[in-house]
Image (cartoon, grey):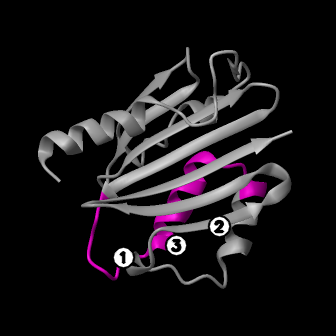
Amino acid sequence: MSKLLSIFFLMAVFSSHVFAVDSCAFESEVSKQQQTISDQRALSQLWLPETQEVKGVLKTGQFINIQYWTCHNYGLQADLLYKQLPADIDLHAQTQLLAELALSPENQQLLVESLKDAEIKPGDLPYSLHIDESQNFMLSIESLDEYILIRLSQYQS
């Protein structure tokens, strides 16, 4: 993928969200913890209060975007994007990193339990997993040319 296409791709991934529509309101009670990425992990970050979204770059080079929103229900979408690394990359560790940054401890535990028997390798992508049907809680991992995108999404009544 050319650098120009990569830039357009990054802009598209990190400037939109899948679930929220014009009539939705963004979560008004987002905790301070959700507004920032740990200083130990973030190289740079930006909190956008109008969309309840944090965007940043981690010290390890990944791009991150986390958005909390409400429409008629609660939802979140969290994306971790990074340049594809060697085939032995630990996708479980990358998924856990995103979960630690975006999910409640309860949902982190649900994810860990759902993934404990899963073996995910870059050659197996795209990969998707319904973690909890009642919350529409999903994990998807896909390879986009030279990038890997890990997305956690949740829509809860």
Callout 3 touching callout 2 (CB < 8 Å): no
Amino acid type shown at disc 1: Ile
Mark nearer the N terminus (3 vs 2)? 3
Label 1, label 2: how many angstroms apart (C-alpha)? 19 Å
Image position of 125 with respect to 104: above or below: below
Going 71% across and 37% down the picture, which residue do you hit?
75
Circle nearer the viewer, 1 or 2: 2
Residue at the disc numbered 3: 92
Residue at the disc numbered 1: 89
Image position of 113 with respect to 134: above or below: below
Label 3, label 2: how many angstroms apart (C-alpha)? 13 Å
Residue 118: which numbered mark, if any? none
Residue at the disc numbered 2: 129
Quarter of the picture holding the C terminus = top right
Amino acid type shown at disc 3: His
For disc 3, the neighbor class at 10 Å (few under 14, some 14 to 19, many from 20) is some
Question: Which residues make up the magenta segment?
Answer: 83-107
Mark nearer the N terminus (1 vs 2)? 1
